[in-house]
């Protein structure tokens, strides 16, 4: 078993705990990706990216034959965006003002994610900024994902639609298994 770390932090942890790692250059098709989610709906659509590695996580998920999500029951929602949960968007720093304007034009409230214990924005491992977009309840996540990805300067969004094959939701004292229908 080899792992493909999606962040510098994951790489350091893998090395520390002696988990064998590889790269997409060595293994461009992966058998399995296992990850968490910030929100998950009954159709297995996700919001991810509160940890800041959304672009790399989506690349690894796309390279995988099967994506399995593991989450606790607090992450399962009826509709993505519930509780005013933002959609993280990774954007080129140069384009951030334009991306924020475009998000406002579609009715969202964009906020550049600020670092803790530092001055300035969070910078991803790719050298980009994260814009947390408050977009309300998302009834058509695939359409919204496409709309956001079409904005010039957007690298990736935290909406993961039609990607998850299986999700395990921890719900004391059991685990709920959700399987994609199509």
Image: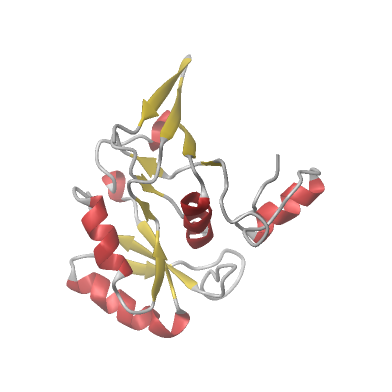
Outermost residue toward the bottom in this view: 94
Picture quadrant where residue 100 is located: bottom left
Residue at point 39% right, 46% down? 163
Picture quarter with the N terminus? top right
Picture quadrant where residue 149 is located: bottom left
Q: On the picture, is 103 further left or further right than 112?
A: left
Q: On the picture, is 83 further left or further right than 119?
A: left
Note whether residue 135 is visible: no
Query: In the rendering, at what x and y percent does residue 95 appear?
Result: 39, 82
Residue at point 38% right, 43% down? 39
Position of 7 relative to 112 (above/below): above
Seen from the viewer's position, the closer of residues 25 and 138 is 25
Note whether residue 176 is visible: yes
Query: In the rendering, at what x and y percent does residue 29 appear?
Result: 56, 51
Position of 1 relative to 11 (above/below): above
Seen from the viewer's position, the closer of residues 30 and 88 is 30
Q: How many marks?
A: 0
Query: In the rendering, at what x and y percent does residue 37 appear?
Result: 45, 43
Identify the coloring: secondary structure
Residue at point 41% right, 24% down? 177
Residue at point 24% right, 41% down? 79
Picture quarter with the C terminus? top left
Query: In the rendering, at what x and y percent does residue 75 appear?
Result: 40, 37
Picture quadrant where residue 164 is located: top left
């Amino acid at each position: 078993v080899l792992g493909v770390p999606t962040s510098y932090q994951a790489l350091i942890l893998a090395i520390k705990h002696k988990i064998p790692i590889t790269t997409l250059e060595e293994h461009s098709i992966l058998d399995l990706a296992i990850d968490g989610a910030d929100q998950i709906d009954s159709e297995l659509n996700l919001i991810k990216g509160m940890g800041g590695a959304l672009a790399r996580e989506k690349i690894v998920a796309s390279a995988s034959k099967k994506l399995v999500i593991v989450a606790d029951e607090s992450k399962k929602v009826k509709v993505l965006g519930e509780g005013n949960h933002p959609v993280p968007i990774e954007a080129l720093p140069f384009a951030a003002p334009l991306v924020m304007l475009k998000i406002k034009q579609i009715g969202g409230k964009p906020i550049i994610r600020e670092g803790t214990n530092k001055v300035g924005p969070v910078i991803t491992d790719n050298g980009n900024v994260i814009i947390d977009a408050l977009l309300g309840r998302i009834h058509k996540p695939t359409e919204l994902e496409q709309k956001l990805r079409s904005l010039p300067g957007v690298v990736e969004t935290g909406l993961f639609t039609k990607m998850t094959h299986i999700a395990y939701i921890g719900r004391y004292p059991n685990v709920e298994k959700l399987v994609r229908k199509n």
